[in-house]
Amino acid sequence: MQKKMDGMSSGLDLNAPSFTTQPKDIDARWTDLLNKPRVMKGKDLPKSPHEGFQVRYPDWTQVGLETFICFFEEFPPGGVSQRHGHMNEAVFYILEGRGYEIHDGEKFPWEAGDLVIIPDGSVHRHVNADPNNPAMALVINPKPTFISYNLRAQRLVDRPGEGST
């Protein structure tokens, strides 16, 4: 094994300047990224309405994320989103509450501590099954990457109040 490792590193100058030792002002873009916030208080993020729910996310132009986004989505008691689909996949980490997803007609229950995977192209909806308490999820998706490739398609399948849960 050691022989194999030695062969892999032959020709590698371990004393050469590396990414971590290069001056941080080498590129204005890198300097700009270093000046972006590294910690943001979730409770301080502004609430914005989204499909009958509320989302909390920073001003994306100010945080330096270029390949994915991350935000909180709050589901009101008994809340049901519109059926919709998008080209990008998404991951929801359920922070509070209980409910279920409907993906392409199939029901998937969730509760706090669960990870929900939404495949790209899936027609889906989010449902808070608790009529008395809100639910909250941390949502992570690569929408900026998809937008940079001009893969923007996102569509609502139902208008508000239509469709099945």
Image (cartoon, rainbow, N blue to C red):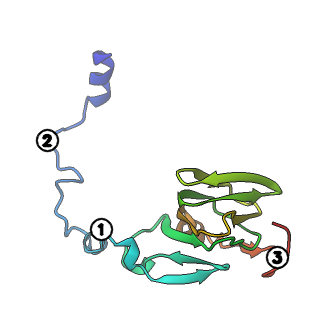
Label 3 SS: loop
Q: Indicate which disc, 1 or 3, sits on the residue closer to the N terminus.
A: 1
In the rendered image, the vertical position of residue 21 relative to residue 144, given as above or below: above
Q: Could you give the CA–CA distance between mark 1 and mark 3, rounded to whole angstroms? A: 38 Å
Which residue carries the number 3 mark?
A: 158
Picture layout, residue 108 above or below residue 48: above
- Residue 40 falls in image quadrant: bottom left
Residue type marked 3: Asp
Dot 2, how many residues are within 10 Å of its Cα: few (below 14), some (14-19), or many (20+)?
few
Instruction: Look at 76% across and 59% down and name the residue there.
Output: 102
Across and down, in percent, residue 162 comes to: 84, 77
Viewer-nearest residue: 56 or 6: 56
Residue type marked 2: Asn
Q: Residues within 10 Å of mark 3 (few under 14, many from 20)?
A: few
Q: What numbered label is drawn on residue 15?
A: 2
Query: The disc labelled 1 sits on which kind of residue?
Result: Arg
For the N terminus, the image quarter is top left
Q: Residue pushed farthest left?
A: 15
